[in-house]
Image (cartoon, rainbow, N blue to C red):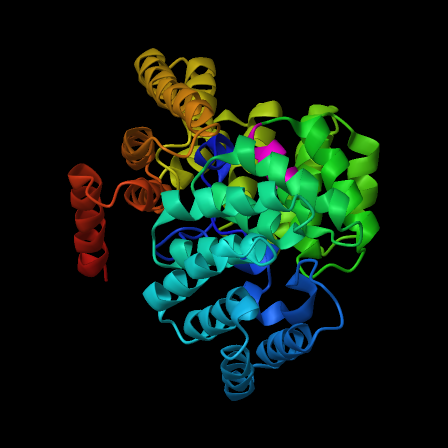
Amino acid sequence: MRREVGLSMSHVRESSTPAPRRGLRLSYVLLLGGLLVATGIKLVPSLARGSHAERVYRAGLDAMGRGDLAAVLVAAESLAAVPEAAGQRHVLEGCVHLRTGQLQAAIAEFRAALEDPRTAPMANMLAGESLCRNRQFRDGIAALRAATQQDPTLTDAHRRLSAVLYDLGATEAATEELLVVAQQDPTDPRPHRMRGLIFKDMESYAAAIEEYREALRRDPLLPERDEVLLELATCLLKTLQYAELEELVADSPQTADFLVLLAEAKLNQGEVAEAARLVDEALRLTPEHFESRLLKGSVELARGELTEAAATLEAILGQQTMDFRVHHKLSQVYARLGQTERARAASEEAARIRDLRARFADLHGQVSGNTDNADLRYQLGLLARQLGREDLAVSWFTAALAIDPTHTDAQSALRLADATTSESP
């Protein structure tokens, strides 16, 4: 996925990215790159080599990898005459059902294949895939965990499990699975990229930096390289590693996103003139860039240009009314202008938003370690809505329903989101 807006505290605090589409975040794309059944032969567990049944089975899996469903069915029919190959036949038939979207039929076939210990790990993995696509997440997670226990070396089972856990907001468990994937596939940068993202969202910036560096080491040209560099640059800013940040920005696309990070570093170091120059360049590139407009207000405040700072900050309230930093900066500006009542009101609003953020962070910490609590996810959705992040609210309500499809409050909250969206111009 383009990392669609995540479910983290840092996104509630700072993000001004567009809202994602409805549904759980598609980490399938980032972690797997497509259906598991499309990867073919590399998913085959250890089987007795050399038998006719095994050759037919492998030929069927190769055909599945090519998308030749007719050949897969031919292989399955050939195995029907071999009683000891029943598990392999069920796997092949289940793969066809999964590929064609017949999820219940696929689940039935994969469960039948569990009776053969040779095919049980793969069958559990593919049953987990099918169950999750059928929105039976609890059963899907259980099947995927069973696959990893039956065959700890089945890397794609760990991949799928990490993706589902991440989508449900169980990021603590997801990081553990991602580490296994990274260890078992030392050429794949994606597990480290995802671990970096999770650690960044947890505000564990030093750990995130190491993960991003490893992802880039494994593949300096990975498809989402610019996103990774931007996330890494943010972490470098947070950890005050200004020299490395400047080097990174120099080698990155000259966009407002990168320039404003360097401008903030310069302002933090007292280089106000250089910060102002970088902010002006960022706004020249993207005139409505929220972070650049906010930093412009900070630069004006640092210069003592109080009237200009007030005007700048007041103008961006329409973009992010629930960003506590705007209200905090305005309280400082108003206080220096002698506007006591306005300073007090701005300070109180900043404190109110900070309190909401603290409650969100607390609930998020509770959710990160479990996959069963729909209520907590619903409460996170309500808090995200109060914080003006309807995109995050939808993600959390959807996650609550993934765990408990009968959660009536989450259903009502999503209907409200639908009604609001339909009324928008």
Question: Residue at (68%, 51%) from the top-left corner?
Answer: 190
Residue placed most toward the observer, 27 or 225 = 27
Prevalent SS, magenta region = helix
Query: Which residue is pictured at 22% across the width and 40% down the height?
Result: 410
| Residue displayed at 63% across by 68% down | 39
Q: Quadrant of the C terminus?
A: bottom left
Position of 38 with respect to 193 (left or right) is: left
Looking at the image, residue 178 lies above or below residue 111: above
Relative side of 54 to 411, left or right: right
In the shown orientation, is residue 46 left or right of residue 376? right
Q: Is residue 26 visible?
A: no
In the image, residue 283 sits, relative to residue 180, either above or below, namely below
Residue 260 location, quadrant: top right
Residue 262: x, y in percent? 71, 39
Q: Is residue 363 visible?
A: yes
Residue 411 is inside the magenta segment: no
Q: Is residue 367 left or right of residue 388?
A: right
Where's the N terminus, which quadrant? bottom right
Q: Which residues are magenta?
A: 195-202
- Please provide percent x and percent y for residue 353: 36, 23
Q: Nearer the viewer, residue 250 or 112?
A: 112
Query: Which image quadrant is residue 82 in?
Result: bottom right
- Residue drawn 70% across and 47% down? 153
**316 or 112, which lies in front?**
112
